[in-house]
Amino acid sequence: MAKVLVLYYSTYGHVETLANAIAEGARSAGATVDVKRVPETVPEAVARNAHFKLDQTAPVATVDELPNYDAIIVGCPTRYGRMAGQMASFLDQTGGLWARGALHGKVGGAFTSTATQHGGQETTLFSIITNLLHLGMTIVGLPYSHQGQMTLDEIVGGAPYGATTIAGGQGQRQPSELELEGARHQGTLIATTASKLFA
């Protein structure tokens, strides 16, 4: 049975929702799944003034626990077409793991949210995936076996590189059912892959 970590940062809750859907998909494939978040780096007074979602139930992860998992799925919102600073700060602390190859061969994946359809979903996914490749991980994305990402009937996130959602300029849009289906699908694929590799 694969052990999967869904590791995320979420400012307003959109990525948190995707993280839980990914976890649901991984559990459906028989994996043991933990959902954890990275520490907030914005001062609390500033975060509260900006209405950050500070009541998230997921525990805060530490870098040292990452080698305990067979698969790590990383998600955060887009900031100027790249990963949010909170996640970058956390991943910047993995140098010791990189130096000893502690994550070599483990399965990785990425997911994100943007305000708009063209706000940098794919570049943000790649900014996460680049880190995972440097850590020696095997990447599983969101292939077109999730056909919902090809619909022309509604606005929808998703890319071959990972699950995504579109939040709206004021955060007014929550992940759609098609986007949640994509997240579950990616979670299932990653858990299945990890199970095959670590059986």
Image (cartoon, grey):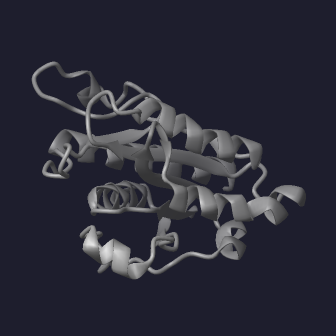
* Residue 108, horizontal then vertical, whole percent: 60, 48
The answer to which image quadrant residue 152 occupies is top left
Question: In this rendering, does residue 31 appear at all?
Answer: no
* Residue 86, horizontal then vertical, whole percent: 52, 62
Residue at 75% x, 49% y is 135
Question: 129 left or right of 53?
Answer: right
Give the answer, above or below, for where 24 lies relative to 166: below
Question: In this rendering, does residue 3 appear at all?
Answer: yes
* Residue 70, horizontal then vertical, whole percent: 64, 60
The one of 184 and 167 positioned closer to us in this rendering: 167
Residue at the far left: name it.
Answer: 153
Q: Check the picture and name the quadrant holding the C terminus.
A: bottom right
Residue at 45% x, 31% y is 122
Question: 9 left or right of 54?
Answer: right
* Residue 188, horizontal then vertical, whole percent: 42, 49
Residue at 67% x, 67% y is 66
